[in-house]
Image: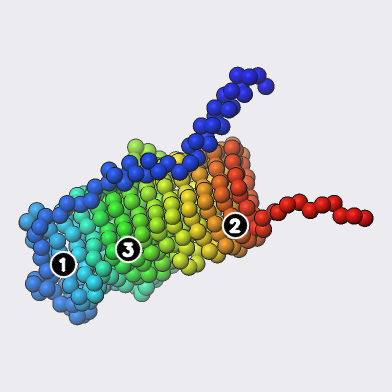
Amino acid sequence: MNSKYLLLLFFTWVSFSQNSDFPSERVDSIVKRIQLPVIPAYQINVLKLGAKGDSITNNKKVFDKAMALCKKNNGGTIIVPKGIYKINGPIHFVSNVNLKIEKGAKIKFSDNPKDYLPMVLTSWEGTMLYNYSPLIYAESCTNIALTGEGVIDGEGGKTWKTFKAKEGEGKNRSREMNHNSTPISERKFGEGYFLRPQMIQFLNCKNILVENIRIENSPFWCLHLLKSESITIRGISYKSLNHNNDGIDPEYAKDVLIENVNFDNGDDNVAIKAGRDHEGRANTATPSENIVIRNCNFKGLHGVVIGSEMSAGVRNVFVENCKTAGYLKRGIYLKTNADRGGYIKDVFVRNIKLDEVEDCLYMTANYHGEGKGFQSDISNVHFSNITCKKASESGIVIQGFADKKIRNISLRNIEIKSAKNALSNENAENVVMTDVFIGQRAGVPSAVSKP
């Protein structure tokens, strides 16, 4: 090997080592440019408009009127005081509005699907289409907030729950339309297709705050940040254990701060997505990027997930100072397959404390073994200062393809005290491990025994 090649190898190694440190200055830059919504001084209390927090009266018209008054006044705060407010249908935001649900207040949505018609532009598992309205919905709004210490109940455990077993036809139709580039205006679902709506969705919105509220009993994904940017999610909590109850789903989202969240979900806590298959790959100009997740308590299926719908690409994800507060199947989970294409890169994870999980750190390019022709590119993923009490299955899993290897993975200061399978590293290159312990640490070697 000549000296020129050795020098090149040295500089490559130094560069990779430097880039594997957690880049706090990049996190600070993202957080600094995220703007909180600016809300005008106008306020309206829903009780003054005739609302009744008796858990029986339908307050749909009152909440619509409150939103219309805010629009007339160029924005304002809608105050929901103590009580249980039944609403038979969705709340649709306008710009410059804070919906403040005070402590002791609960908004309880109906579970009659007809209440969420007419259909609106939305997305379902990575494909844009028209479907039932999300329960709380904003499209093309700026400066919007959902705050207070109250509860939003999506009533997802009865009628909506039955949709899961019947969603196959609608799901397959949506994917065919995605693959065939069917115009979005022709992608009409709603009645007869059983695709459940999200609890809260912000579509094409900017300067968003969701703070301190509690989310319970969602029909589908809980909080969907779709094609939106400059987003702050903090201090919220969950108890939502129905099918596909992801906590937070940033999708085609940019500049997102998620902090101090207490998760308790029937699916992923945070699932970062970026569109699906052909449609996602056509939107590479809008990847999900610049996402900061910190100081959260994980409980549910998986902690932080990237994928599987990530075809436009995911980059610049920073996860730090999080821990488990109960059961978690997988801690950090990167999942994609040969249908997706796109990329996952520049992911930094540090200071994570996991209790008992099935798998601690899991990266796979062969999720469900599906697809062909569009292998994803996974590179530059860095883990440091991670502890796990027990992995009942695998400690660390890395699965690439022989002709599309996962690249540039660093693992530093990782301690998994017990694991059925310690390490599975397949079709990966430049995997650097420093101070990685799986199982009991080896001590000083013993002397040779005397015969």
Q: Which residue does the image show at 40% across and 59% down from the upper left? A: 296
Tell me if residue 244 can be seen.
no
Mark 3 residue type: Ile
* Closer to the camera in the image, 365 or 357: 357
Mark 1 residue type: Ile
Q: Residue furthest left?
A: 72
Mark nearer the N terminus (3 vs 2): 3
* Closer to the camera in the image, 203 or 97: 97
The residue at which mark 2 appears reads as 416
Q: Which residue does the image show at 37% across and 49% down from the upper left? A: 292
Mark 2 residue type: Ile
Residues at circles 1 and 3 in contact by the CB criterion of under 8 Å = no
Q: Residues within 10 Å of mark 1 (few under 14, many from 20)?
A: some
The residue at which mark 1 appears reads as 79
Q: Which residue does the image show at 59% across and 23% down from the upper left? A: 7
From what the image shows, is residue 428 above or below residue 6? below
Q: Residue furthest right?
A: 451
Residue 77 in the image, given as x and y percentages of width and height: 14, 61
**Quadrant location of the N terminus in the rendered image:** top right
Mark nearer the N terminus (2 vs 1): 1
Q: Is residue 341 left or right of residue 72?
A: right
Residues at circles 3 and 2 in contact by the CB criterion of under 8 Å = no
The residue at which mark 3 appears reads as 236
Find the distance from the CA under tag 3 to the CA under tag 2: 29 Å
Q: Is residue 104 left or right of residue 74?
A: right
* Closer to the camera in the image, 12 or 183: 12
**Circle 2 SS class:** strand
Please tell me in which quadrant of the rendered image residue 104 appears.
bottom left
Please tell me in which quadrant of the rendered image residue 215 appears.
bottom left
Residues at circles 2 and 1 in contact by the CB criterion of under 8 Å = no
Mark 3 or 2, closer to the camera: 2
